Image (tube, rainbow, N blue to C red):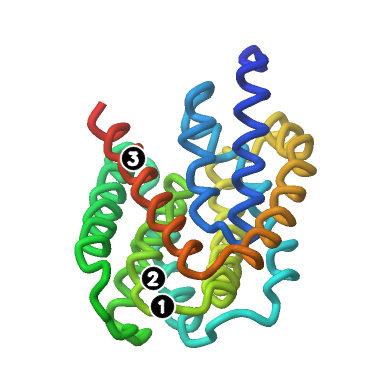
Amino acid sequence: MTDISLSFVLLASLAALLVGLSKGGLTLAGALGTPLLALVTSPVRAAALLLPIFVISDWFGLYAYRRDFDKRIMQIVIPAGLAGIGLGWLSSSVVSERRVGLFIGVIGIAFCVNAWRMRGQVVAPRPADVPRGLFWGVISGFTSFVAHSGGPPYQVYVLPQQLPKTVFAGTTTLIFAVFNMVKLLPYWQLGQLDRANLKLSLLLMPIAVAGTFIGVRLVRVIPQRTFYLVIHIALFVLSIKLVADGLR
């Protein structure tokens, strides 16, 4: 516990707030938490510290969006994501977190550039097709396990479907709530959920819960076009951060 400093406390609190905001519907905010906390501790410890906070915050998000979700997307993405989590677990000893982050970042940047290139054109919503859903679902589950960064691959699949903003937020919250619950077992088996981390997670819980309610409120009042613009910008910024980390 020698690395408990003022900078650690401040960044851990901000990371917990971002996790809460993501569970309130600002979905990509949570993916910034691990890279942010990794500035003052190891990436492995950062991910382990935030996982219980993700899980508890999920329950508040589930309640807020209990009526807003797309059942078909969930039926496609959840099984594929669970397979991806299993793949991450099996390969945890050989996979480089930074290389995975680099891969995710390149995907996210390419997606955003293409979306902005086609801005102003009338594009019909894409259906929730099974092949793409299975592919991106596996990648999302895998990257979620390795670095809590399952959001960008998931967005590549879901954003083109142009869901109503509350359905988008609710579907995302439900899917990642399942992912996070399942990740508890392999994280525990790998020895990443030690008592010290759990105590710190408990202290940060109130911040994350407050962030969840703030996120729900913001989603309700932000216009849909602005909501998706914010999502795209956040995805782009996060992707650049992941690429930069992967190339260091």
Count of numbered badges drawn on the protein: 3
Structural crowding at the residue carrying mark 3, measured as other residues with C-alpha within 10 Å and reported as few (<14), some (14–19) or many (≥20): many
- On the picture, is 243 further left or further right than 210? left
Q: Which residue is mark 3?
A: 242
Amino acid carrying label 2: it is: Leu
> To which quarter of the image does residue 60 belong?
bottom right
**Which residue is found at the position 60% from the left and 37% from the top?**
15
Q: Position of residue 172 (x, y in %)?
A: 53, 68
Lower position in the chain sequence, tag 2 or tag 3: 2
Q: Quadrant of the C terminus?
A: top left
Which residue lies under the disc numbered 2? 159
Q: Distance between the Cα atoms at labels 1 and 3?
A: 25 Å
Query: Would you say the residues marked 1 and 2 are in contact, meaning their CB atoms lie under 8 Å apart?
Result: yes
Q: Which secondary structure lies at badge 2?
A: helix
Q: Residue at x 79, y 43 (%)?
A: 206
Image x and y of residue 197, in percent: 67, 33
Residue 48 place in picture, x, y as percent: 58, 39
Q: Residue furthest front?
A: 120
**Residue located 37% across and 43% down the image:** 237
Is 77 situated above or below 124?
above
Disc 3 marks which amino acid? Leu
Q: CA distance from mark 2 to mark 3?
A: 20 Å
- Local packing at callout 1 (Cα closer than 10 Å; few below 14, some 14-19, many 20+) is some
Distance (Cα) linking label 1 and label 2: 6 Å
Residue at the spot of label 1:
162
Proximity of marks 1 and 3: CB atoms separated by less than 8 Å: no
Mark 3: which secondary structure? helix
Which amino acid lies under the numbered mark 1 shown in the image of this protein? Gln
